[in-house]
């Protein structure tokens, strides 16, 4: 019996679609499953059989590959300063104990002979859209504590993870992000889920819409510090509705951090830009006893005329809703709370502008 040729029309479906098409076989209509999604190329780092010993090398190879790439990283410590510029790449820990670490601070001199500055200090800087980070520890191990005594750095801001403005739709899942001052710089639409974010001074900051779901937000202990710093420093544009949003997070502390010593945050008017009016919101979070009764405080800036001014928390958009725990606002406190109706607008779809990883 001869075989009739089968014509399969060209499919125009996304990788995730499960559509089917209809083909004609000898005059009989036959359902043919849609082509399967293209499998990601996997690059493995830190295994003897791959020859790839650094994450930097894996990223260089990923940039030459057409289609999705997943970089799977073996447990170990990788002292590297990384820039992720490959769209849609996934960086995944193959098991517990994948630590990516570097020690740049803003006042340190970079290889180009200039100070790093805050924006360039990141141990990992994400510049591409669609990046996923899963199960990694990303750390800036600049010795902040020693620098509080010596002030030798000339600038102690030291970012662990930075999401640049050129990035978008960054998903950070079950990662640990560690630093002291300016740990996490968020300038791209992003979702952080089940992460542990550790720092002291303005340690979650930036102007993008970012949602933190079920994360541990940990204030660090600094010996002899008069106060334990500030969690959020939003620099959201005034015409942008959503900024830093913490939902069902545990706002906690390292051992030794005193009660009533840390602020929920302060509004950062970056560069004195008067179009900035930061927003940070804590929804259904448990706040431990290190949070100050007033919750929020002011932050100084220099306006376009060169005048030093303060942006007060009452002028910005800093709110809570249904906080619990010993750090929650006591009755009569001046901390602003959302109404139930206002809180209902803070859905993941609204905050992330329709994107869901």
Image (tube, helix red, strand yellow):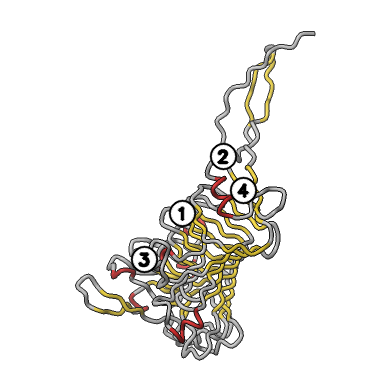
- Which residue is at a point 56% across and 37% down the rendered structure image? 14
Q: Is residue 210 above or below residue 326?
A: above
> 10 Å neighbourhood of mark 4: few (<14), some, or many (≥20)?
many
User: Who comes first in sequence, dot 4 or dot 3?
Assistant: 4
- Which residue is at a point 29% across and 67% down the rendered structure image? 273
Residue 70's disc is 4
User: Which residue corresponds to mark 1?
Assistant: 127
Dots 2, 4 in contact, CB < 8 A: no
Q: Position of residue 357 (x, y in %)?
A: 56, 52
> 10 Å neighbourhood of mark 1: few (<14), some, or many (≥20)?
many
User: Who comes first in sequence, dot 3 or dot 1?
Assistant: 3
User: Which residue corresponds to mark 3?
Assistant: 114
Q: Position of residue 217 (x, y in %)?
A: 56, 74
* Left-right relation of 176 to 301: right
User: Which residue corresponds to mark 2?
Assistant: 67
For the residues labelled 2 and 4, the Cα–Cα distance comes to 10 Å
């Amino acid at each position: 019996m001869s075989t009739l040729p089968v014509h399969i029309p060209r499919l125009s479906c996304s990788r995730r679609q499960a559509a089917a098409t209809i083909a004609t076989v000898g005059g009989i209509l036959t359902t043919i499953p849609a082509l399967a999604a293209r499998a990601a190329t996997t690059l493995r780092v830190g295994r003897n059989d791959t020859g790839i010993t650094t994450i930097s090398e894996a990223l260089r190879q990923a940039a030459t590959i057409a289609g999705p790439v997943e970089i799977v990283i073996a447990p170990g410590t990788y002292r590297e300063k990384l820039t992720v510029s490959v769209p849609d790449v996934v960086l995944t820990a193959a098991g517990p104990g994948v630590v990516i670490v570097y020690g740049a601070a803003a006042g340190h001199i970079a290889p180009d002979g200039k100070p790093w500055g805050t924006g360039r200090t990141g141990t990992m800087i994400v510049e591409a859209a669609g990046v996923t980070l899963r199960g990694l520890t990303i750390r800036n191990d600049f010795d902040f504590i020693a620098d509080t005594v010596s002030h030798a750095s000339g600038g102690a801001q030291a970012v662990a993870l930075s999401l640049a403005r050129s990035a978008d739709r960054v998903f950070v899942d079950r990662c640990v992000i560690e630093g002291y001052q300016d740990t996490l710089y968020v300038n791209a639409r992003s979702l952080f889920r089940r992460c542990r974010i550790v720092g002291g001074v303005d340690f979650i900051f930036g102007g993008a819409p970012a949602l933190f779901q079920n994360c541990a937000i940990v204030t660090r202990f600094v010996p002899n510090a008069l106060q334990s710093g500030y969690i959020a420093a939003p620099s959201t544009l005034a015409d942008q509705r959503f900024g830093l949003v913490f939902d069902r997070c545990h706002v906690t502390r390292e051992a030794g951090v005193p009660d009533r010593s840390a602020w929920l945050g302060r509004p950062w008017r970056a560069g004195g830009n008067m179009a900035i009016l930061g927003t940070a919101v804590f929804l259904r979070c448990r706040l431990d006893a290190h949070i100050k009764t007033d919750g929020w405080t002011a932050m100084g800036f220099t306006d376009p005329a060169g005048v030093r001014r303060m942006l007060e928390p009452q002028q910005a958009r800093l709110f809570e809703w249904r906080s619990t725990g010993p750090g929650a606002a006591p009755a009569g406190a001046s901390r602003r709370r959302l109404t139930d109706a206002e809180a209902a607008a803070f859905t993941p779809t609204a905050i992330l502008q329709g994107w869901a990883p």
